[in-house]
Image (cartoon, grey):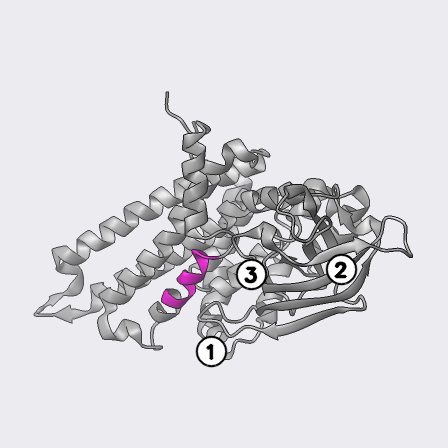
């Protein structure tokens, strides 16, 4: 068993770490305060080849896979989870296309993502259908004017990158709107320029400012048959896509936890209290040791999950291992950011320090792409079904 990264992935990690320190860190506070999309960082990522990490080489990417993307995101998320989200969005909407898309779809939509000439977003959630995906109301009805075509009507919400995207992966009911059957949902590629596609309200978020999250309104949008992803009745595709993303979201959590702890350690080593440095107190040292251990545990869970996903092991029997990474790493981000803020005391609550930014950003991670509670349910079901068993 070799725990060392292959040379090409170690090199990738080094590149991402340098970019994070030199380009992302100096911009983190301004991105949070202005909420403006950091186009300059997108260009940096594009020039470094970080936008095509998950895209196969045949479609213009580097083929570094989920693990490669997770490594890059971990480094970037040490300083800005908004910047890390930009990298995540190269995989979330393209995942269903890579898993079940036609060769024509892959050639048409993937190279632009890898080159940075195109961007995409993922539309699954709705106001009344977040964790309860099959409650979605967005409807796809057969287009009488085009054989095999569809007409979409509905509203998607909480879509990261909605305002910047050129196309969207959208899930809609192709069966009975009231049906809870999994074969009543299908995936479509919807282009931003099409008539009836409109970006709606942009959300006012607690954190992760800089990458807009908001609504996508679909009014009588005509989708040609060649833009159906996989089979009609593709709910399973949504789950496969999200399963494979668990380690990518986990990497955002690990990076945030690392960044927060490193920042706090530098502070307590310099801060004097009662004639000693804060770092000299055993209580402080125990907090640091606890977080450091949990970060390493989260890293092992996440790297294993990324390796599994790259092997195509993101079907039901592998879900517990993938969900463990997402659950543990994102909850750790909340814990680490809170503990780091506490170590700084009143100073940590102020915008003079990044601790309050990390604290706000961390909360998003336990909600997006499957809440903590959803992950715990999936892990428990895996144990009950003996997909995860030790005998």
Residue 51 makes an appearance in the image: yes
What residue did someone put label 1 on? Answer: 33
**Which quadrant of the rendered structure holds the N terminus?**
top left
- Which circle, 1 or 2, is nearer the viewer? 2
Residue pictured at 75% horizontal, 41% vertical: 231
**Which quadrant of the rendered structure holds the C terminus?**
top left
| Sequence-earlier tag: 1 or 2 | 1
Asked whether 208 or 17 is in front, the reply is 208
User: How many numbered tags mark residues here?
Assistant: 3
Residue 232: percent from left, percent from top: 75, 44
Query: In screen coordinates, is 69 left or right of 115?
Result: left
| Element on which disc 3 rests | loop
| Element on which disc 1 rests | helix
Whether residue 295 appears in magenta in the rendering, the answer is: no
| Element on which disc 2 rests | strand
Residue 41 falls in image quadrant: bottom right
Residue 266: percent from left, percent from top: 27, 63
Residue 4 makes an appearance in the image: no
Residue 230: percent from left, percent from top: 74, 42
Q: Which residues are magenta?
A: 359-367
Q: What secondary structure predominates along the stretch shown in magenta?
A: helix
What residue did someone put label 2 on? Answer: 152
Image mark for residue 128: 3
Residue pictured at 54% horizontal, 52% vertical: 132
Callout 1–callout 3 Cβ contact below 8 Å: no
Residue 125 falls in image quadrant: bottom right
Whether residue 361 appears in magenta in the rendering, the answer is: yes
Residues packed near mark 1 inside 10 Å, few (<14), some (14 to 19) or many (20 plus):
few
Residue 262 falls in image quadrant: bottom left
Disc 1/disc 2 C-alpha distance (Å): 37 Å
Residues packed near mark 3 inside 10 Å, few (<14), some (14 to 19) or many (20 plus):
few
């Amino acid at each position: 068993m070799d725990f060392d990264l292959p040379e090409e992935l170690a090199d990738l990690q080094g590149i991402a770490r340098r970019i994070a320190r030199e380009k992302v860190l100096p911009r983190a506070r301004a991105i949070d305060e202005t909420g403006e999309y950091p186009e300059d960082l997108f260009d940096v990522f594009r020039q470094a080849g970080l936008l095509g990490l998950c895209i196969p080489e045949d479609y213009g990417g580097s083929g570094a896979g989920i693990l490669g993307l997770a490594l890059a995101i971990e480094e970037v998320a040490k300083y800005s989870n908004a910047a890390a989200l930009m990298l995540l969005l190269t995989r979330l909407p393209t995942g269903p296309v890579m898993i079940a898309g036609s060769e024509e779809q892959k050639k048409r939509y993937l190279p632009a993502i890898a080159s940075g000439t195109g961007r995409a977003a993922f539309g699954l959630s709705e106001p009344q259908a977040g964790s309860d995906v099959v409650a979605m109301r967005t409807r796809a009805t057969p287009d009488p004017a085009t054989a095999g075509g569809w007409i979409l009507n509905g509203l998607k919400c909480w879509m990261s990158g909605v305002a910047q995207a050129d196309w969207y992966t959208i899930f809609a009911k192709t069966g009975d709107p009231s049906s809870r059957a999994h074969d009543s949902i299908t995936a479509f590629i919807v282009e931003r320029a099409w008539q009836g596609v409109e970006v709606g309200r942009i959300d006012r978020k607690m954190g992760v400012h800089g990458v807009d999250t908001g609504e996508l309104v679909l009014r009588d949008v005509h989708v040609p048959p060649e833009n159906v992803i996989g089979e009609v009745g593709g709910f399973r595709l949504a789950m496969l896509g999200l399963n494979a993303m668990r380690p990518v979201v986990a990497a955002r959590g690990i990076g945030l936890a690392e960044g927060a702890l490193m920042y706090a350690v530098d502070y307590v080593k310099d801060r004097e209290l009662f004639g000693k440095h804060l770092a000299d107190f055993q209580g402080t040292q125990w907090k640091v040791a606890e977080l450091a251990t949990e970060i390493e545990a989260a890293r092992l869970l996440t790297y294993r999950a990324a390796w599994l996903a790259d092997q195509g092991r993101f079907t039901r029997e592998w879900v517990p291992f993938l969900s463990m990474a997402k659950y543990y790493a994102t909850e750790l981000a909340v814990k680490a950011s809170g503990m780091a803020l506490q170590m700084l005391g009143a100073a940590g609550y102020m915008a003079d320090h990044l601790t309050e930014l990390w604290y706000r950003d961390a909360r998003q991670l336990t909600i997006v792409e499957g809440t903590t509670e959803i992950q715990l349910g999936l892990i428990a079901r895996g144990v009950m079904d003996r997909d995860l068993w030790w005998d």
